[in-house]
Amino acid sequence: MPRKPNEELHSLVVSSSVPQPIISDFELYYRSVEQKLWSASYSSGSVQLDSDYLYPPSSGRETLSVGSSITQTARVQAPPNMENYCRFINLHLDGFLMNAMSSLDTLARLIITVCYSGHPRLNKIYITNIHPQLRVSHPNCMLTSQLLSELSQTWFRDFQAYRTCTTHESLIKYDVNLGFDQLHNTYRIPNLKLPDDPRAKPFTYRKRREVKTYCRTTNKRLQLMVFRLYESMLIDFRASGNIPIP
């Protein structure tokens, strides 16, 4: 089975005649990208919480008596703790968005400080601000055109807006309306939605962007984006035979 482009690039770099300080820096950022991608995947899967978050152990699964019939009293499940549930959804959603963007920003640092040469030093390095430097220093490299293509995707712009919002705000609000199932005497837990555009207030939900589905889909897109960027870096490295790529 062929290795992934990131693994192939790593293998070629560490086995090359590149000076040891460069290999050390490459290893540092490479491993950090891997860790943050793993953390993002973990958090995206954790957004689907089980019932323990609805009924914390301290509260128990209480029931309420309904009716006063001598022969039968219906037992109705008490309302779940939706504030607690939303708090944990926000915890894992924040974790996903922060680790996902952090993986890309760390990859940007690997690109601009280790793998590609000939550009001025940046005070702040993000995946969104290195393309102008690459366009000047490496206009013909595969990575330069691939990065521009990735950053132009609609999903990435939406993802970036959510990530920026979570710096100061929680995307999932606590004012959730619960439905009640009369047949089974249980509360219906709604599918929590993300706002259409977190920059617009008040939030609207016309796109019906369900949070669990969004995280899973975006995580797949993130992994594919990183795959393609590493693939481009591998092509550039093979063409130059050296790091930093001149």
Image (cartoon, rainbow, N blue to C red):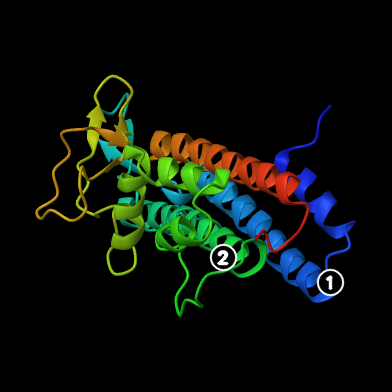
Residue 139 screen position, x and y as percent: 49, 51
Q: Are marks 2 and 1 in contact (CB under 8 Å)?
A: no
Residue 19: which numbered mark, if any?
1
Q: Amino acid at mark 1?
A: Pro
> Image quadrant of residue 110?
bottom right
> Image quadrant of residue 150?
top left
Q: Which quadrant would the N terminus be assigned to in this image? A: top right
Task: Name the residue located 41 percent from the left edge and 48 percent from the top edge.
Answer: 54
Which is more toward the observer, 237 or 63?
A: 237
Mark 1, secondary structure of its residue? loop
Is residue 49 visible from the viewing direction of this image?
A: no
Q: Which quadrant would the C terminus be assigned to in this image? A: bottom right
Q: CA distance from mark 2 to mark 1?
A: 17 Å
Task: Name the residue located 61 percent from the left edge and 42 percent from the top edge.
Answer: 232
Is 31 placed above or below 123 here? above
Residue 105 screen position, x and y as percent: 51, 62
| 98 left or right of 153 in image | right
Which is more toward the observer, 91 or 158?
A: 158
Residue 91 screen position, x and y as percent: 44, 59
Residue 112: which numbered mark, if any?
2
Q: Amino acid at mark 2?
A: Ile
Task: Name the residue located 79 percent from the left edge and 44 percent from the top edge.
Answer: 8
| 75 left or right of 116 in image | left
Give the mark, 2 or 1, whose residue is nearer the N terminus: 1
In this view, which residue lies farthest toward the left? 202
| 116 left or right of 85 in image | right
Determine crowd level at label 1: few under 14, some 14-19, many 20+ residues with C-alpha closer than 10 A: few
Determine crowd level at label 2: few under 14, some 14-19, many 20+ residues with C-alpha closer than 10 A: many
Is residue 86 visible from the viewing direction of this image?
A: yes
Residue 145 screen position, x and y as percent: 47, 43
Count of all numbered marks drawn on residues in the image: 2
Is 125 placed above or below 214 here? below
